[in-house]
Image: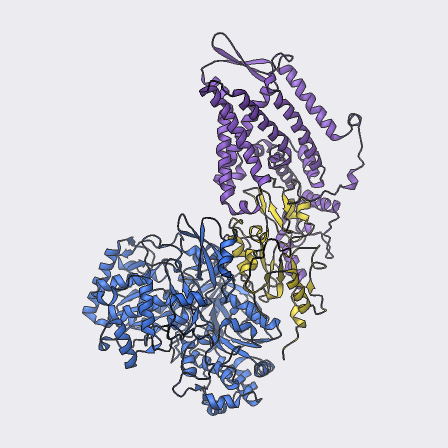
Chain colours: A blue, B yellow, C purple
Amino acid sequence: MQKDKFFRDIENVKHPNEELVKTHCSYCGMQCGMNLRVDKSTNKIIGVEPRYDWPVTLGKMCPKGVTAYQQTNHDDRILKPLIRDDASLKGTKEGFREASWDEAYDLIAKKFGELQENYGKDSLSVFSGVSMTNEKCYLTGKFARVALGTRYIDYNGRFCMSSAAGGFLRTFGVDRGSTLPWTDLHETDCLFIAGSNTAECHPTSMFRIWAVQERGGYLIIADPRETPIARRADVHLDLRPGTDLALANGILNLLIQNGYADESFVNQHTNGFEETKELVKDFTPEYTSMITGVAVEKIEKAAEIYGKAPNAIVMFARGIEQQQKGVDNVSAYTNMALVTGKIGRPKAGVATFTGQGNGQGGREHGQKSDLLPGYRKITNPEAVKAVSKVWGIEPEEMPKPGVSAYEMFELMDNKTIRGLYLLCSNPAVSAPNLNFVRGALKKLDFMVCGDFFLSESAEYADVILPSVSWSEDEGTVTNLEGRIIKINKAQEPIGESKPDWLMQVELAERLGKGKNFSHLKTAKDVADEFRLATKGGNADYYGATWDKIDEQDGVFWPCKDKDDKGTPHMFLDKKFYHPDGKAKICALPYRPPAEEPCEKYPLRLTTGRVVYHYLSGNQTRRIQFLNDMCPDPYVEVHPITAAKYDIKHDEFILLYTRRGKANYKVKITEAIREDTVFVPYHFGHDESINLLTIAALDPMSKMPEFKACAAQIDKLKSGSVL
Amino acid sequence: MTFSIVEPKDKDVQKRRKLYMELENCIGCRACLAACTQCGGHEERNRNYVYDVNPLVNRQTMPLMCLHCVDPACARSCPAQAIQIHESGAVLSAMVEKCIGCQNCTIACPYGIPKFDEEENLMYKCDLCIDRTKDDIPPMCASVCPSNTLQWLTEDEIADKKQATEVGNDKWVTSMPYLEGETHVTVNLPGVLQGTVKLF
Amino acid sequence: MEEISLKEPMKNMKKKTNSINDAFASKFAKSMFIAVCGIVILSFFGTRMFTHVDWNLYGYMVGTIVFLGGFFYRFIAWGERPPTKIIIKKGMKLLFRKSTPKTSVDHLATYKFIWNRGIYRWTQHLLIGWGVIISCLVTFPLVFGWMYFTMEESGMYTIVGMGMDIMTVPADGFIAFMSYNALNFSAIMVIMGVCMALYRRLKNMQARAEQNFMYDFLPLYLLIFISVTGLALTFINVFLHGAGHYVMSLIHQYSVVITLIYLPFGKLAHIPFRPLSVFAKNYREHYGEKSMKQCKVCENEFVSTEQSNDVINVLGTNEIEFNMKDGFNLAELCLPCRRKYRIARFSGFATHEVPIKEANQNAKG
């Protein structure tokens, strides 16, 4: 086979005494293909080699991907279980001692047992993440509901993808992040991208995006900042943070007014057009411009280009989703595709840039408070019955729905939740309103944390279980296209670290649930049970075997059986997943952000990523190259605003909101609105911008409004850094 | 437009590929710097650069790396003849046993590319990942570049690019007047898209 | 690999001559004449008027003379290149700087800069380097009779250097032991060092990429061949009571002669040329103390004025000129400003004039 030949024959790619293990990056939803270079004599990962034959990214990687391999054998890795006996040291790195797995498991079983005996089953909780394989995500849900028997399980996708999920479910009846494969992107004629700093957050999409322009297509970007992608856009809609819904309604109005609506498509395949048309009528370009701050001509131009384009793709990301109307924003932008009929065919559709590596797969399989594997509601008796059978429990034993991620911290604060098993997440940096969240973590009676680095959240734990990095275990991940791909094991776990699924199996045995877990001896065993558990759901993975993934370069779900090749393009038959087969065009009245600027807090604060770091930075801040490139957070300020506050480039200032304050170095740039400041969110402790962000939750997705709140700057007297 | 999967060419194929830079595409991610450190022979030190064009104003960035001059000033100025030119045209790093540490090359290079390690008394620079490119495998920077700013193309492909982007605005450049001499690397300046014919 | 062809600098062609130089057809002839005369005169005294010449070693003599020919040929051709010429000329002038002894020891004896490149490489280089130096220091005085031993009847050895009795030591004493076996020790050092070098050449990717057999491996094989045959001589003498000694000594002698002849033309040429790095260091230090060049853009000092001018001149002799319309030569900009200036040329915006430090360009992987 061509691709095998490539690596086998070229000595300079495949160095002697080395093995190339094909896998994918550990970080974002792009899941760029890569080969890890493994020294055969030491069985250690020693480097990375581009995976030129991976069809989505063709060997391309961002700086995070290039250096990702350095996590595996990093000096900071936790090699043994750690126990802290002195609870007064919570919130610090101090007081941990190394312990055996037996001691750690015994302690956890004892403490969890005591808590559940005294305060009921639901006094325990599980907070998980989606930067791990589908198998682990699946088993975490099962562990919470079967081994712990608690209703309180949720995950960090609530801070990431849940608005996109909510929006797609409402509009399409199904939530697959992208209706088409990424290999279509460069062939479309117009990309409308809202709230995505693609060049920094999903860099390996960029060569396809630029190719659209190179071919003569158009690029429309809606973003408060002139990000590297916005800089080259044909139209840059530089809106105020938190006003996306108005912009989407305004453009939809223009599309309808100017006759770009595809009436036959709308009539045959959608509901809700008339009332939406009625509602958006008010969003004239002038009115939209007044709310969003975007010039009328730009709005008109954007609508015209999108309307005229033979094929167009609407894309969005956290910029529109991390708002207290994130779900509405998603539905509103999706309306554009539905009204113009630019969906359900190749080169046209809707896609969200999934943030976390397995943000797509991880949200489908039962880590969410109200979901079971296969993207089925826990309130649906049929689903409960099907999953209970796979899990070997009675349907009555299935816990009820829990609460969302941020709400769990509220329950910790009021002592409803007393114990926590945290894994694959770092809410002490990534949750909003951190002063409250960190306080809640401190109040816990007992906390277990599974991680491979000592994260800021692990500092609140009583027991830390050393898990493995992505390269020391195998399993599947669903990338931002909805393509199920395979992560391969390149190295044996270092020290005494174990994959999370194995910890959960062993812990379940201690908790007396061995009969439901003990048969899971390998990652493959988990995978087989997992596929079975998804059978019949919307996100049906039953046919996506590891062999098929390998043969086909990934499998797009749904993939129902062994002959099913998967579904790269959704809705080709124009059948949506609502019972009547129609998509829903939603009429969405505009709501302003929860906190509008006022006299005391006149600036809008928005947050986001830089290209060198990933999420809470727990991994990337430890990688020398990445940390050298971006060691500290900063606040981006427009020169006019800076002049108003008399602050200069590289000067430290105090930034504060109603909830918190922090010191940041000023970065002067005209690439931001005058009324807006921006701080990247990858930094811990006193540097976390989430000390300042607001926990205003979207009513449907429970997504906090990270992207817009009111803030103020104080110039520091020299030397008075916080 | 299609993106072809990079395949190694047979050794006897005369048409070697060359590094092609399309500056308009750069997104400033510095993956090229990170990848440079990963090249087998680079001892974890990067040899290329990415600059903010106007840091106080916008996010425009551009990579800068050795352009592999046909008549390299660095080699001309080297008293020890330590800088060799590979048959592919790549201007190599100083040979360790020959470099006497005078740093003439850093002063001579019109683009400021060679780096000097005081401790090791040794100059090092981009060698176009010679361990890869001598077999026509793309150099690390062009392999990973997510924005296609750096590409590894045949003469024909570069000619096609030239045809597609030559818009009479003097922005298609192979060397002069924006460079100081003929180079083996082809540079395409920002502004090339101005002349693109829009689809509709 | 091709080396850059040399363009003869025109203005150096007509040179003032003086009477001594007129006596020779070329610089090469002069150098050879002086060197051979020097050796003959030294040998004349060393061997007490040629009474103590070991004619068994004549092959080495011939080899040395041929080596000198090659060495001068190479060195002179090399020294004529404009940049080399400057370093040699100014280096000679600065030879007696106070820091010269320390720099020489660092560069030529302890190889401190190689230590900084890695302990493995340092060890390997130290073993080979000092192995070869010790061998030369023993072999050539013996060959030309600058040093020899005489055996007294009392069981004492006298070491004679330059015709004078240096010391008399017991034949079974420590110093005598070290003297007889110096070449054995040096051979072992070279073999160990070469093995380390060969191992590195098989493993290191940079080395693998750039090395070729003739340039990188041949000298190593030659060194190891000399050392092994040398040790074999000792082995034959000690364990085989001299059986096959004649053949082996011939093989050894030929291997040395071939290496000597090859030395100026391959990788080993860096041995005689390496002292230039002391020149370079002196050159940078001296002129740096005298006057530093300020960057024409950011006004930071970055190189000596002398070197900046020298480089501009050297490039000028090769018809390379980097005078910009903006009123400076590129060699007058510090490296970050020169890079930013190029960005400015690409973008049309004066990046080099934005007073912000360049972003980190040196992150380690």
Can residue A663 be seen by looking at this rendering? yes
Q: Split into 4 quadrants, where in the image is the C terminus of chain A?
A: bottom left
Q: Nearer the viewer, residue C361 or A516?
A: A516
Residue C359, visible in the rendered structure: no
Residue C49 versus residue A483 in the image, above or below: above
Residue A583 position, x and y percent, is: 44, 85
Compared with C146, A154 (above or below) is below
Q: Position of residue A531 (x, y in %)?
A: 34, 71
Residue at the far left in the pictured view: A117
Q: Across the whole image, how many numbered discs are drawn on residues? A: 0
Q: Position of residue B82 (x, y in %)?
A: 63, 42
In the displayed structure image, the side of residue C322 where residue A305 appears, left or right = left
Q: Quadrant of residue A26?
A: bottom left
In the image, residue A72 above or below residue C21:
below
Q: Residue furthest top?
A: C153
Horizontal side of C101 relative to A79 (left or right) equals: right
x, y percent for residue A159:
40, 71
Report whether C306 appears left or right of A326.
right
Residue A296 placement, left or right of A275: right
